[in-house]
Image (cartoon, rainbow, N blue to C red):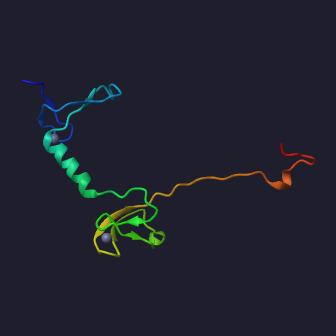
Amino acid sequence: MSDMYACDRCGKPTPNFVPWTCGSIAGKLGYSWCDDCEERFERELAWENEQSEKDAITCPWCGYSDPDSWEFEGEYDDGYECSHCGKPFFVEKRVDITYTSKRRIDDMPEGWVAE
Ligand SMILES: [Zn+2]
Ligand SMILES: [Zn+2]
């Protein structure tokens, strides 16, 4: 009889135990998910069919990429519908902010020569 653990998701007893490769986290050496939870998680992941970090809003149903994505104003909108197949899905907009800085030419010391 193998050791039994409690499923981290639903608390059901399970023999499943997967140790973390990086050692203990918060006093635990790994995680236990029962077969049911494992299966549900994989099913949910496959179901979501996440289209992450695309340049345009991409429909997770039909793959249509919306050329009007830039008009999307919401942060996280469960009312979004594909304009191609009409199915609803979530959209999360992530905007990368970068900064570009440079010296002002006006502050250039006289006689400065580029190397
Ligand atoms: Zn479970
Ligand atoms: Zn679609």
Q: Residue 103: image x %, image y %?
A: 77, 51
Q: Residue furthest front?
A: 115
Q: Residue furthest left?
A: 1
**Residue 98, above or below 16:** below
Q: Residue 20: image x %, image y %?
A: 30, 30
Q: Residue at x 36, y 58 (%)?
A: 51
**Residue 18, above or below 75:** above
Pick the front one: 26 or 14? 14
Quarter of the N terminus within the rendering: top left
Q: Quadrant of residue 15?
A: top left
Quarter of the rendered structure image containing ligand 2: bottom left
Query: In this figure, what is the number of numbered marks?
Result: 0
Q: Residue 35: image x %, image y %?
A: 14, 41
Q: Residue at x 41, y 66 (%)?
A: 57
Q: Residue at x 17, y 46 (%)?
A: 39
Quarter of the C terminus within the rendering: top right
Pick the front one: 95 or 54? 54
Q: Quadrant of residue 3?
A: top left
**Residue 31, above or below 67:** above
Q: Residue at x 33, y 75 (%)?
A: 84
Q: Residue 70: image x %, image y %?
A: 48, 69
